[in-house]
Amino acid sequence: MKTILITGCSSGYGLETARHFHALGWNVVATMRKPRRDLFPASERLRVVALDVTDIDSIALAFELAGPVDVLVNNAGIGLFGALEHSPLQKIRDIFETNTLGTIAMTQAAIPQMRERGSGVIVNITSTTTLAPFPLAAAYTGSKTAIQGFTCSLAHELLPLGIAVKLVEPGYGPTTAFAQNTEIRLEDVLPEPYWSYAEPILDAMADPALFTTEADVAKAVWQAVHDQSEESHFPAGADALALLG
Ligand SMILES: NC(=O)c1ccc[n+]([C@@H]2O[C@H](COP(=O)([O-])OP(=O)(O)OC[C@H]3O[C@@H](n4cnc5c(N)ncnc54)[C@H](OP(=O)(O)O)[C@@H]3O)[C@@H](O)[C@H]2O)c1
């Protein structure tokens, strides 16, 4: 039975992906900063392990506790919506620490055991912001686009070792905790000169015609993990698919 380790399982896409793989018979290591066993059914196949992807010691301990891992899903991420001019540089550093360097550090930690076994899959969750520029999300887009390039280069490097590296690109998911998981107030990062530009964008986000659900992402991760081709890109959600035409 195969084992999948997923980051950021306390809510949203990570939580649903952990539940999906568990329901379909996998061993799941559901990681999160503050472990919550109550989010999952009691099962010997599901372990909840503490992990902060910005902390190298936490990463090492999580892999030690997890044991052999066949699939790593780098899902943990934080967002920032607003004008770049008013986005605090420290917040931008935090976004890159989590979304970009956290993913890179987790990948480095996973490779040795996968290389020794000659098999493994690493799935990096980016965003459709890497496929088509989304306004008022420049720093976030930068953090995810870096992972897009990182993934496509690494996929070549690890292919001869039997390790696949894939991207899952979700669209806008209004039902996750993503928008709430920021201590930044919208009015601080979107002051008056940006109002007329931002208003229609905010209106569209409040009532999106198409969007991505947690289940869409879980299914796209499943597809990416089981893909036997060299395809790197797995868009998730009705809006992501519409974007690609
Ligand atoms: N929702 C969207 O519109 C959307 C669109 C495209 C892509 N995405 C991407 O999809 C992924 C999941 O987002 P989501 O929408 O499911 O949001 P979410 O509900 O906020 O989930 C994000 C998860 O990341 C975790 N996390 C944050 N910082 C972490 C850290 N330093 N170490 C470990 N875990 C950390 C959070 O855990 P805590 O409980 O510890 O904070 C949470 O479990 C993210 O990478 C996001 O960028 C989201």
Image (tube, rainbow, N blue to C red):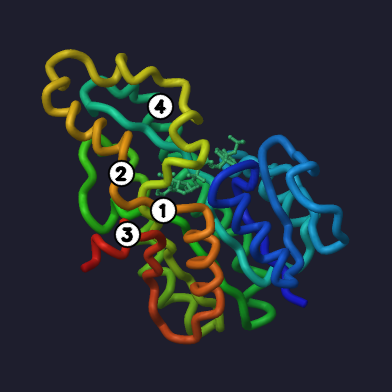
Q: Is residue 145 left or right of residue 39?
A: left
Q: Position of residue 236 (x, y in %)?
A: 41, 62
Q: Earlier in the sequence, mark 4 or mark 2?
A: 4
- Residue receiving disc 2: 208
**Category of crowding for the residue at label 4, using alpha-carbon neighbours closer than 10 angstroms: few (below 14), some (14–19), many (at least 20):** some
Task: Inspect the image, locate mark 3, and give the three-letter code of the amino acid beneath it.
Answer: Ala
Separation (CA) of disc 3 from disc 1 = 8 Å
> Are the residues tagged 3 and 4 within 8 Å (C-beta)?
no
Task: Inspect the image, locate mark 4, and give the three-letter code of the amino acid beneath it.
Answer: Lys
Does 96 appear above or below 67?
A: above
Q: Earlier in the sequence, mark 3 or mark 1?
A: 1
Separation (CA) of disc 4 from disc 1 = 26 Å
Q: Is mark 2 within 8 Å of ligand 1?
A: no
Q: Position of residue 205 (x, y in %)?
A: 30, 37
Q: Which mark is residue 91?
A: 4
- Residue receiving disc 3: 240
Separation (CA) of disc 3 from disc 2 = 12 Å
> Are the residues tagged 3 and 1 within 8 Å (C-beta)?
yes
Q: Is mark 1 within 8 Å of ligand 1?
A: yes
Task: Inspect the image, locate mark 1, and give the three-letter code of the amino acid beneath it.
Answer: Thr
